[in-house]
Image: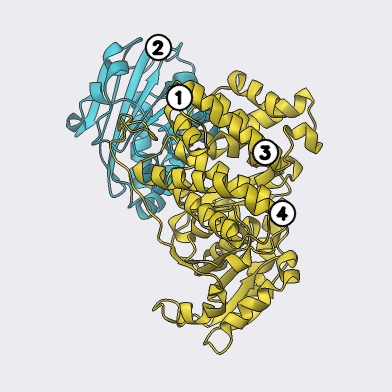
């Protein structure tokens, strides 16, 4: 029997693994962006480029690096859309799509965190097929190819640079809209550690915990399969080993590079074994109260792990071993509890609050009930290892809040 | 009025599906056997429906109901040749059909069991949503107290024999839109 991962019965009759995104990694890689795209048959004719980003990224000078990487190439930056907010919404997409049409954009370079990359996916979709975002909500509702996206992440968490999905807020309904489609995978994910070298420590912590949540939830997903498992486990271990250093020692490019890679690997995992209840709660809290997605995941993660523990003890035991827990013959359940304890310690080390109420989220019964009901309607619940009705799920939400 | 989740309802759905030009156009990806098991109907019966599609055309379908608990149905193993099997109580399926419950909410419930490759099913969301939309437009009653056109013990049509009804439990949809949760 495997020491790290139990040799559990393989109970999947079939599975599919799919990630079409080309991954290009390298320190200083952005400097060669034009060259990297020029050698691709399907991209070399896409000359009308729009950069989608946010004002924070623009202020750091990272966009200048991207523009320098396109200098003397066939790619012309027609427009820089820098209005993506931290919690992007459908109005922003509509605004950006207007520019897409105006400049006849046929290539999008998205430079930023999850909000920017996901916004770029929606822009690519609506800019190609028209209509309203709600028309495409859910799984695989996109009818065909979209404007290609080059994704350059500047955070260490989203995984959106290689993922099948995108999430955006509808401020009118205070809900998050999720889409998943093979047509919105970025064409290229360009990982350059220099693009995350100046990321503020707080955002490294939040986005890193987001990546850890992706890895853990993919590892125990109802759709887990050996390829996604391998990716998720490796990502979880890399994140556990490097996140605290990446937060506390910004000059440590090795730790930040590993975090960037691990976040991408976790994205590949959850694109094929979707995330679960932590994300369902987090999407709801984000929709209602605008809390940062990574922070929201970080708060809920250990509680959801406790909720799921009895449904996947051997998985959590394996994670415990990856998280430096000495296996002295303990049961899987005991090891699983220790894995959760390690997550709690990591949260403390990263200065992440224990509960949502510590972040000024209301803790009254109406809020708890509303969060419970909305979270149970989130698509991610379909992939959680433990299903639940309101009465079972509400105590979990109450604990997290 | 047609009673929900009866042979008459399925036949009306089949008629509408096969006559809908949009469905014909959009459902070409829909191929395979979709099985649903619906437990504890208001008439005290468990029921099963099987829908077999080939490139969006219904090539066969079947319906059967027997007094609950119909153990043979409830214990039947999932056949990996099927695209999916969904199983849930009648009340949940009725709530879905009435729009009182979303498919996503059903999928988070331990009372709604979906078998099959969910990732593959997600790729069929668009045609499955259309399928569901068409079926949900059939005017139905959930009142089983009247005597008319209740369940014939076994009612089959077309090539239903391809899929033994007793092996053919119910289906649920992978993702959030309408999907086949109700079919």
Kindly report which numbered mark, 4 or 2, lies closer to the viewer in this rendering.
4
Query: Disc 3 on helix, strand or loop?
Result: helix
How far apart are labels 4 and 2 at the CA level? 70 Å
Would you say the residues marked 3 and 2 are in contact, meaning their CB atoms lie under 8 Å apart? no
Q: Which residue is mark 2?
A: B147
Q: Position of residue B24 (x, y in %)?
A: 35, 51
Provide the secondary structure element on which disc 4 rests: helix
Disc 4: which residue: A201
Q: Colour of chain B?
A: cyan
Coloration mode: by chain
- Point out residue B104 in the picture as x, y percentages from the top left corner: 53, 35
Q: As displayed, is residue A184 above or below residue A75?
A: above
Asked if the residue under mark 3 is in contact with the one under mark 4, i.e. CB atoms within 8 Å, the reply is no
Q: Nearer the viewer, residue B10 or A251?
A: A251
Query: How far is mark 1 from mark 2, CA to CA?
Result: 67 Å
Chain of the residue that carries numbered disc 2 in the rendered image: B
Q: Within 10 angstroms of label 4, few (less than 14), some, or many (20 or more) residues?
A: some
> Residue B45's image quarter?
top left
Left/right placement of residue A6 relative to residue A35 reads left
Asked if residue A1 can be seen in this view, the reply is: yes
> Which tint is chain A?
yellow
Give the alpha-carbon distance from disc 4 to disc 3, as whole Å. 14 Å
Q: Position of residue B165 (x, y in %)?
A: 24, 24
| Mark identifier at residue A347 | 3
Rounded to the nearest angstrom, the CA distance separating label 1 from label 3 is 25 Å
The residue carrying mark 1 is: A328
Rendered-image quadrant of the N terminus of chain B:
top left
In terms of depth relative to the viewer, which is nearer, A166 or B144? A166
């Amino acid at each position: 029997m495997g020491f790290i991962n139990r040799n559990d019965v393989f109970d999947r009759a079939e599975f599919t693994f799919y990630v079409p995104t080309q991954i290009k990694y390298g320190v200083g890689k952005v400097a060669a962006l034009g060259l990297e795209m020029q050698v691709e048959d399907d991209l070399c004719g896409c000359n009308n480029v729009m950069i989608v980003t946010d004002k924070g990224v623009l202020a750091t000078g990272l966009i200048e690096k991207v523009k320098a990487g396109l200098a003397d190439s066939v790619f012309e930056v027609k427009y820089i859309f820098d209005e993506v907010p931290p919690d992007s919404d459908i109005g922003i997409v509509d605004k950006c799509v207007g520019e897409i049409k105006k400049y006849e954009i046929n290539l999008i370079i998205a430079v930023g965190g999850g909000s920017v990359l996901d916004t770029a996916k929606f822009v690519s979709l609506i800019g190609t097929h028209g209509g309203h975002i709600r028309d495409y909500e859910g799984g695989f509702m996109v009818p065909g190819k979209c404007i290609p996206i080059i994704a350059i992440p500047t955070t260490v968490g989203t995984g959106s640079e290689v993922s099948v999905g995108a999430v955006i807020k509808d401020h009118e309904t205070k809900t998050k809209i999720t889409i998943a489609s093979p047509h919105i995978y970025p064409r290229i994910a360009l990982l350059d550690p220099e693009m995350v070298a100046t990321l503020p420590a707080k955002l490294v912590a939040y986005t890193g915990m987001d990546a850890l949540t992706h890895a853990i939830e993919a590892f125990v997903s109802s759709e887990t399969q050996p390829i996604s498992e391998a990716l998720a486990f490796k990502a979880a271990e890399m994140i556990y080993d490097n996140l605290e250093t990446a937060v506390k020692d910004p000059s440590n490019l090795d730790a930040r590079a590993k975090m960037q890679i691990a976040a991408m690997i976790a994205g590949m995992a959850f694109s094929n074994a979707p995330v679960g209840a932590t994300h369902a709660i987090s999407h709801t809290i984000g929709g209602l109260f605008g809390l940062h997605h990574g922070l929201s995941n970080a708060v809920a993660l250990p509680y959801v792990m406790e909720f799921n523990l009895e449904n996947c003890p051997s998985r959590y035991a394996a994670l415990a071993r990856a998280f430096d827990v000495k296996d002295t013959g303990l049961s899987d359940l005991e090891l699983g509890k220790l894995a959760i304890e390690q997550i709690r310690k990591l949260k403390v080390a990263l200065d992440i609050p224990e509960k949502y109420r510590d972040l000024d989220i209301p803790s009254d019964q109406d809020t708890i009930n509303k969060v419970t009901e909305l979270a149970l309607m989130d698509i991610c619940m379909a992939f959680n290892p433990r299903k639940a009705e309101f009465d079972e799920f509400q105590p979990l939400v109450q604990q997290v809040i | 009025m047609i009673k929900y989740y009866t042979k008459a309802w399925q036949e009306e759905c089949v008629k509408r599906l096969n006559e809908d030009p949009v469905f014909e156009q959009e459902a070409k990806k829909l191929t395979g056997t979709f099985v649903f098991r619906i437990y504890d109907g208001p008439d005290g019966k468990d029921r099963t429906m099987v829908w077999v599609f080939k490139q969006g055309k219904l090539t066969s379908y079947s319906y059967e109901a027997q007094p609950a608990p119909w153990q043979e149905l409830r214990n039947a193993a999932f056949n990996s040749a099927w695209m999916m099997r969904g199983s849930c109580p009648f009340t949940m399926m009725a709530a879905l059909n009435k729009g009182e419950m979303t498919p996503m909410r059903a999928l988070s419930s331990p009372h709604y069991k979906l078998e099959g490759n969910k990732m593959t099913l997600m790729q069929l969301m668009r045609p499955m949503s259309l399928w569901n939309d068409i079926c949900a437009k059939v005017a139905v009653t959930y009142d089983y107290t009247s005597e008319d056109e209740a369940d014939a013990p076994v009612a089959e049509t077309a090539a239903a024999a391809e899929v033994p009804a007793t092996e053919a439990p119910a289906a649920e949809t992978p993702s959030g839109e309408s999907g086949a949760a109700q079919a």
